[in-house]
């Protein structure tokens, strides 16, 4: 169980790296897109995040449902933007920016909310 949780958390960090990395590599290019790293990254965050919560519940570990609920809502918002815009040839800077901002907000919630 402990190993499963550790492996899921590693995947959670890889998903985070993929989502944020897909955003950050587009700082310079004028044309912004929803790239595969962002698409797969947000999916990974949803799947591994929910699996981490399920595993914690199964192990009777206390889960802060408010914190997790906020993270889920933010991740769903990112996922909707990514899904809706992923086939477009380009997205506006505000659309690209909101994905990065919401991702960073989720990192802050994860780390700062005690
Ligand atoms: C963009 C989306 C997300 C980002 C950037 C993110 C980021 C993080 C980070 C940095 C951690 C490690 C810090 C900590 O343990 O406090 C973490 C842990 C965790 N995340 Fe997320 N997360 C995201 C989405 C989600 C979602 C959607 C859920 C569940 C619905 C979730 C559930 C969890 C849980 C349960 C842990 C704690 C794991 C443990 O310590 O056993 N995360 N997340």
Image: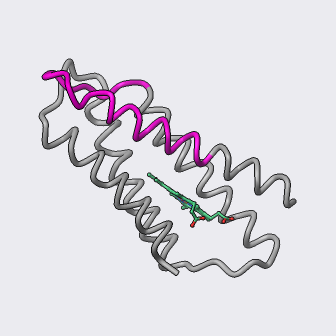
Give the quadrant of residue 31: top left
Magenta stretch holds residue 19: yes
Up/down of 14 relative to 91, above or below: below
Q: Is residue 44 left or right of residue 100?
A: right
Magenta part of the chain = 12-36
Residue shown at 76% from the left, 54% from the top: 6
Q: Is residue 25 left or right of residue 93?
A: right
Quadrant of the image where one finds ligand 1: bottom right
Q: Nearer the viewer, residue 58 or 37?
A: 37
Q: Is residue 7 left or right of residue 43?
A: right
Residue shown at 37% from the left, 52% from the top: 103
Q: Is residue 61 left or right of residue 19?
A: right
Q: Position of residue 49 (x, y in %)?
A: 59, 56
Q: Position of residue 73 (x, y in %)?
A: 40, 63
Q: Position of residue 37 (x, y in %)?
A: 44, 28
Magenta stretch holds residue 44: no
């Amino acid at each position: 169980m402990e190993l499963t949780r550790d492996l899921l958390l590693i995947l959670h960090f890889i998903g985070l790296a993929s989502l944020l990395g897909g955003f950050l590599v587009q700082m310079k290019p004028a044309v912004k897109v929803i790239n595969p790293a962002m698409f797969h990254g947000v999916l990974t965050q949803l799947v591994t995040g929910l699996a981490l919560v399920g595993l914690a519940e199964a192990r009777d570990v206390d889960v802060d449902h408010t914190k997790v609920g906020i993270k889920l809502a933010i991740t769903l918002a990112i996922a909707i933007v990514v899904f809706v815009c992923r086939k477009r040839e380009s997205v506006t800077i505000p659309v690209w920016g909101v994905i990065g901002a919401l991702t960073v907000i989720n990192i802050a919630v994860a780390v700062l909310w005690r």
